[in-house]
Image (cartoon, helix red, strand yellow):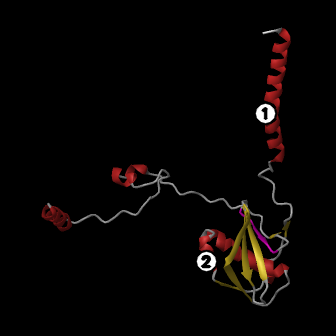
Amino acid sequence: MKKPRFILAVILFAALLFFGIILPILFKKDSKPKASETPSTTQVVTTQEADAPEVTYQTFDALDDFLAQNQITALKEQFPLYLQTKRLSTPQTVTFLSDETVYPSAEETEFFFSMTNGEKVPVYYDHFGHFLFGKEKLLLSDATITYEKETLDDPSALTTKEIEQMQEGGYMDTTPEPSMTVTDSTAAVDRSKEVK
């Protein structure tokens, strides 16, 4: 191969590496948002719970399809604070509208609740685990909750059969089925003889 062609081949190969591999990596790093950032449209509101109105919750059982029980409890604790920021001091009834739940983005779930006065209140649940109330996305509690995973401290008390029925984390995968009694097993053997 002649010297000018060799130099041209090396230059083209270097350009290919730069534009095909290095440049896309640089663009990916710049476009990713940091995971520690909270949404820029939220406002943290501090209120006192003593002035919060009394709230009655209806059809909150349907929230079990979307949230864990501890998250539903946290939502119920924050609703009186939201009503207080809206200057509503009369007792309110909050009804969950499960049919209107939408997913505006991959990181958010938007729930709708109907108030006593007929107003629809959107509540956003983001991927950070925060509830954002109203169209203005008010953040009433920025506390991060960490849940401990239950573990077995003494695995020596388990038998081999019990271990086989457990998941990898040490929790029961399925409930154990009741074992067959002696009369059931002999009846099954008798039926198999009749079939032959």
Q: Which residue is mark 1?
A: 20
Residue at 74% in and 75% down: 78
Does residue 55 appear left or right of residue 171 in this picture?
Answer: right
Q: Is residue 26 above or below residue 63?
A: above
Q: Nearer the viewer, mark 2 or mark 1?
A: 1
Q: Which residues are magenta?
A: 129-134
Q: Which residue is mark 2?
A: 62
Q: Is residue 38 above or below residue 81?
A: above
Q: Secondary structure at mark 2?
A: helix
Q: Secondary structure at mark 1?
A: helix
Residue in the foreground of this view, choosing between 3 and 64: 3
Q: Are marks 2 and 1 in contact (CB under 8 Å)?
A: no
Give residue 94's quadrant in the image.
Answer: bottom right
Does residue 31 appear left or right of residue 184 in this picture?
Answer: right
Residue type, mark 1 in image: Gly
Residue at 16% in and 63% down: 195
Q: At which x and y percent is residue 148?
A: 59, 58
Q: Which mark is residue 106?
A: none
Give residue 178's quadrant in the image.
Answer: bottom left
Q: At which x and y percent is residue 135?
A: 83, 73
